[in-house]
Image (cartoon, rainbow, N blue to C red):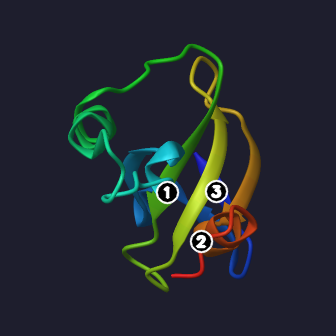
Amino acid sequence: MIINHPLLGPRDAAEFIYLGDAALIDRPDWQAEDAMQQFHDYAYLRDNPAGPHRELWYHEQGDRSWLVVTRDTTTHEITDVQMARDVARSRGRDK
């Protein structure tokens, strides 16, 4: 599988580590009234979709960047790759 890195171009998936659902970017608010439940759900509950899914990938054997990869889990076709920092910033996360 080839991942088209936004900065480095096409790279073999062997250079990356799959880290799970891209929803992990949206950490719960630790000061919320139901923070314990939110963190439980954040840490333990995962979807297992068949079809398009946004995932986190870490470029371990390269520039050590985090990517959000949109991949069809049934065909492994990659339709979009973005820098995770850009995705986080677009959602109002500065750090």
Q: Are marks 1 and 2 in contact (CB under 8 Å)?
A: yes
Residue drawn at (21%, 41%), measured in percent from left and top?
36
Q: Which residue is mark 2?
A: 93
Q: Which residue is mark 3?
A: 3
**What kind of residue is marked 3?**
Ile
Residue drawn at (69%, 61%), measured in percent from left and top?
91
Percent position of residue 47, x then y: 43, 21
> Which residue is most to the bottom?
63
Q: Nearer the viewer, mark 1 or mark 2?
A: 2
Q: Which mark is residue 82?
A: none
Q: Which mark is residue 25?
A: 1
Marks 3 and 1 sit apart, C-alpha to C-alpha, by 20 Å
Q: Is residue 86 left or right of residue 59?
A: right
Q: Nearer the viewer, residue 84 or 61?
A: 84
The answer to whether residue 1 is above or below residue 81 is above
Q: Are marks 2 and 3 in contact (CB under 8 Å)?
A: no
Q: Earlier in the sequence, mark 3 or mark 1?
A: 3
**What kind of residue is marked 1?**
Ile
Q: Nearer the viewer, mark 3 or mark 1?
A: 1
